[in-house]
Image: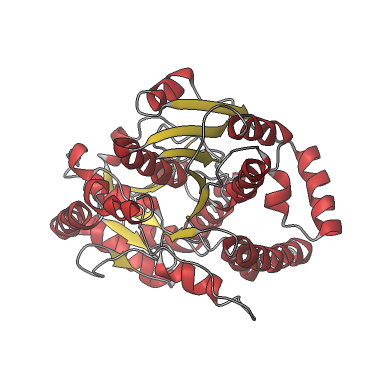
């Protein structure tokens, strides 16, 4: 088959969950199909990353994504007037639409169009409309890969937002997205879901009419057998969070941990070090009174492994979000003991207290982290169980054969 694959983020390097998902789906599809990748790119995306993707995609086309606070304000106003979700209005780019129309109306005939995440759904629908208008062009099937129940992200953020205006805007965005997701998913031939929870949540927004299509649940997977287990220091004292902090649920989660949980950890383990690795760390992290000797914050780093090798507890203290947290899959792959909230581990098959520790209250979360810091043997037991679990359950070489039921 000829597949046009549309992504909102360049799916390489593998430094964020959406990239991991898209990358290994691409790899799997490229084994037996001809895949043309069309992706937005940021200034940080390198020619080397694009060259790597070209090594297994037939063609790679890119469109710069340009954002600014001024543009966001204009899109917010547009969203308030039109009723369209802000994140959908913000990411509609005429240059992307023009490129897609050119490809669809060109000599290549695509059998399927794959939209990676809800952000790219409008472009897949537009591509099919272009194909139907093009003389002699077949109507391609369209596939949506739903990484999240997207409306749940602003909905959950709103429940803990202290600013009344921000809370109202988040609640409004969640309401608009819930309606938009239902209507959009219904227009696709196939919708793959990352978790059963996401499908149930979106289906729960259906007031009337047909059910939302589902091609089944295909979880986010990695390549654990290609990644050796880290050798961790026997005297590891880092409590590590890894993730893009420009993503609001990540920023909210680490701030909750730093304010409510880590002081309890320090009371029992005074030499513990909270290590925060991720793009655009929130300034609030410096306001919670954590001594400088016990706090290390970096921006994005290409290779976090030196920090991970000194990690006693890999934390996922999320209170909001949707889909799967790839950081747990990564933590297991590296052989790290993971502590997460229920929301953080949502959608992931797991064995609580065997391959991951789960805690939702600050005192309980602190207790689990302290246990890992004070008992390296116990930490190693949890880490080894996590590694064995990810190899068995989240390996793209085996789990992504499920995509063959869609692309036949």
Q: Is residue 75 above or below residue 319?
A: above
Lateral position of residue 80 relative to residue 122, left or right: right
Relative depth, front residue between 72 and 142: 142
Locate residue 402, reporting x and y percent.
30, 56
Image quadrant assignment for residue 304: top left
Locate residue 290, reporting x and y percent.
48, 50
Locate residue 284, reporting x and y percent.
60, 49
Locate residue 139, reporting x and y percent.
56, 47
Lateral position of residue 74 relative to residue 321, left or right: right
Numbered marks: total: 0
Q: Residue furthest front?
A: 136
Q: Is residue 116 visible?
A: no
Quadrant where the N terminus is found in the figure: top left
| Residue at x 33% of width, y 50% of height | 272
Q: Residue furthest bottom?
A: 208
Relative depth, front residue between 129 and 133: 133
| Residue at x 59% of width, y 25% of height | 43
Q: Is residue 209 visible?
A: yes
| Residue at x 76% of width, y 57% of height | 84
């Amino acid at each position: 088959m000829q597949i046009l694959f549309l992504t909102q983020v360049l799916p390489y390097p593998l430094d964020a969950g959406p990239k991991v998902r898209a990358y290994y789906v691409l790899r799997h599809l490229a084994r037996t199909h001809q895949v043309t990748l069309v992706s937005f790119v940021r200034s940080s995306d390198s020619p080397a990353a694009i060259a790597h993707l070209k090594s297994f995609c037939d063609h790679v086309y890119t469109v710069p994504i340009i954002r600014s606070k001024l543009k966001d304000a204009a899109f917010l106003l547009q969203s308030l007037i039109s009723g369209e979700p802000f994140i959908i209005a913000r990411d509609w780019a005429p240059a992307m639409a023009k490129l897609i129309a050119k490809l669809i109306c060109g000599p290549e005939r695509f059998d399927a169009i794959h939209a990676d995440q809800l952000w790219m759904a409008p472009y897949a629908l537009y591509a099919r409309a272009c194909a139907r208008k093009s003389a002699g062009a077949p109507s391609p099937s369209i596939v949506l890969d739903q990484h999240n129940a997207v409306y749940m992200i602003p909905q959950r953020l709103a429940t803990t937002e202290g600013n009344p205006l921000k809370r109202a805007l988040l609640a409004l965005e969640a309401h608009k997205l819930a309606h938009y997701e239902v209507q959009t998913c219904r227009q696709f031939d196939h919708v793959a879901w990352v978790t059963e929870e996401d499908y149930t949540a979106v289906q729960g927004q259906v007031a009337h009419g047909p059910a939302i299509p589902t091609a089944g649940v295909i979880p986010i997977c990695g390549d654990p057998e290609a990644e050796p287990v880290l050798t961790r220091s026997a005297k590891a004292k880092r409590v590590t969070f890894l993730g893009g902090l420009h993503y609001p649920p990540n920023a909210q989660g680490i701030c909750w941990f730093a304010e409510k949980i880590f002081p309890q950890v320090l009371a029992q383990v005074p030499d513990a070090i909270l290590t925060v690795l991720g793009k655009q760390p929130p300034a609030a992290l410096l306001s919670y009174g954590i001594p400088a000797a016990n706090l290390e914050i970096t921006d994005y780093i290409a290779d976090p492994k030196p920090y991970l090798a000194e990690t006693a507890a890999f934390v996922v203290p999320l209170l909001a979000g949707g889909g799967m947290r790839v950081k747990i899959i990564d933590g297991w792959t590296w052989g790290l003991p993971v502590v997460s909230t229920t929301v953080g581990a949502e959608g992931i098959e797991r064995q609580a207290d065997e391959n991951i520790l789960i805690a939702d209250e600050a005192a309980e979360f602190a207790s689990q982290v302290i246990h890992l810091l004070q008992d390296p043997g116990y930490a190693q037991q949890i880490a080894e169980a996590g590694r064995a679990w990810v190899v068995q359950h989240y390996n793209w070489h085996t789990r992504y054969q499920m995509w063959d039921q869609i692309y036949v």
